[in-house]
Amino acid sequence: MQIDENLKRVYQETLEEEIPDRFRDLLAQLRRQDEQGEGEE
Amino acid sequence: MKRSDPREELVDHLPALRAFALSLTRNGATADDMVQDTLVKAWSNIDKFEPGTNLRAWLFTILRNTFYTSRRKLKREVADVDGTYTAGLSVKPAHDGRLQLNDFRRAFARLPDEQREALLLVGALGFSYEEAAETCNVAVGTIKSRANRGRTQLADLLGLKDNETLDMTDGATMAVINARHGSPR
């Protein structure tokens, strides 16, 4: 269907883009916080 | 027992989350802020996620709730912004009748939120109707009808209903243009 094809094209760019650093950094930071907060398990 | 930590899978869902956020907010910066909020919420509430259930739907639900909560807070403001935004948009088929991506993008942005999200999930991200229903916390039939209404409205906005409509719309557009600029002989 033409509409679905166009929908995919519109968002393809975002879907294929590299994940911005801010998100990788954020995840790393969250992980560090957990490790410090809880201690080993 | 904690074989796989669902938190390790969050990164896999980031591209789709960003696309979903973008479709909701229609603004790249706002969208990524919302994805960031979603990540933090998901991380700190991961104990509420039932292992073995659908992580993607769970994450999308968080993102969606984040969006609708923040929008409720800004209700009046955003309504105005939306009005201005949509008023500035005009959609008509390209002269050759081919659907242009920018026209499509504008038309899609004009759809009501509920239809836009249903179409995005099902049409662009390949969610099943069941998964989309779970994400939006509504019945499967509701998602189907929102997606269908969205498709119909998009087709209307773009003059795609059928070839006849397309020709008519295009003819009408040309008539207006010709009338305004004087007949180009």
Image (spheres, rainbow, N blue to C red):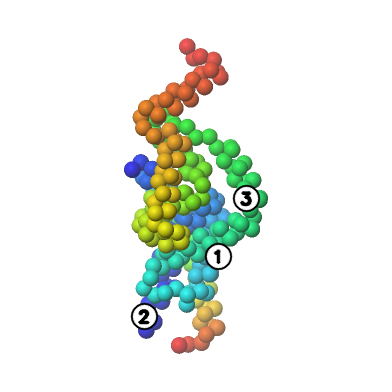
In the image, taking residue A23 as reference, residue B55 lies left or right, namely: left
Pinpoint the chain carrying mark 1.
Answer: B
Q: Earlier in the sequence, mark 1 or mark 3?
A: 1
**Position above or below: B165 against B150:** above
**Position above or below: B94 against B36:** above
Pinpoint the chain carrying mark 3.
Answer: B
Helix, strand or loop at mark 3: helix
Pinpoint the chain carrying mark 2.
Answer: B
Q: Earlier in the sequence, mark 2 or mark 3?
A: 2
From the image, tell me which residue sits under label 2. B3
In the image, taking residue B2 as reference, residue B105 lies left or right, namely: right
- Classed neighbour count for the residue bearing mark 3: other residues with Cα under 10 Å, few (<14), some (14–19), many (≥20): some
In the image, taking residue A16 as reference, residue B88 lies left or right, namely: right
**Position above or below: B136 against B170:** below
In percent of width and height, residue B23 lies at 49, 51
Q: Residue B132 occupies which quadrant of the picture?
A: bottom left
Residue in the picture at 47% in, 32% down: B92
Looking at the image, the residue that sits furthest to the left is A1
Residue A36, can we see it? yes
Looking at the image, the residue that sits furthest to the top is B185
- Classed neighbour count for the residue bearing mark 2: other residues with Cα under 10 Å, few (<14), some (14–19), many (≥20): few
How far apart in space, not on screen, are marks 1 and 3 (Cα)?
19 Å
* Residues tagged by mark 1 and mark 3 found on one chain of the structure: yes
From the image, tell me which residue sits under label 1. B37
Q: Which sits in the foreground, B3 or B63?
A: B63
The three-letter amino acid code for the residue at tag 1 is Asp
Helix, strand or loop at mark 1: helix
- Classed neighbour count for the residue bearing mark 1: other residues with Cα under 10 Å, few (<14), some (14–19), many (≥20): some
In percent of width and height, residue B125 lies at 39, 55
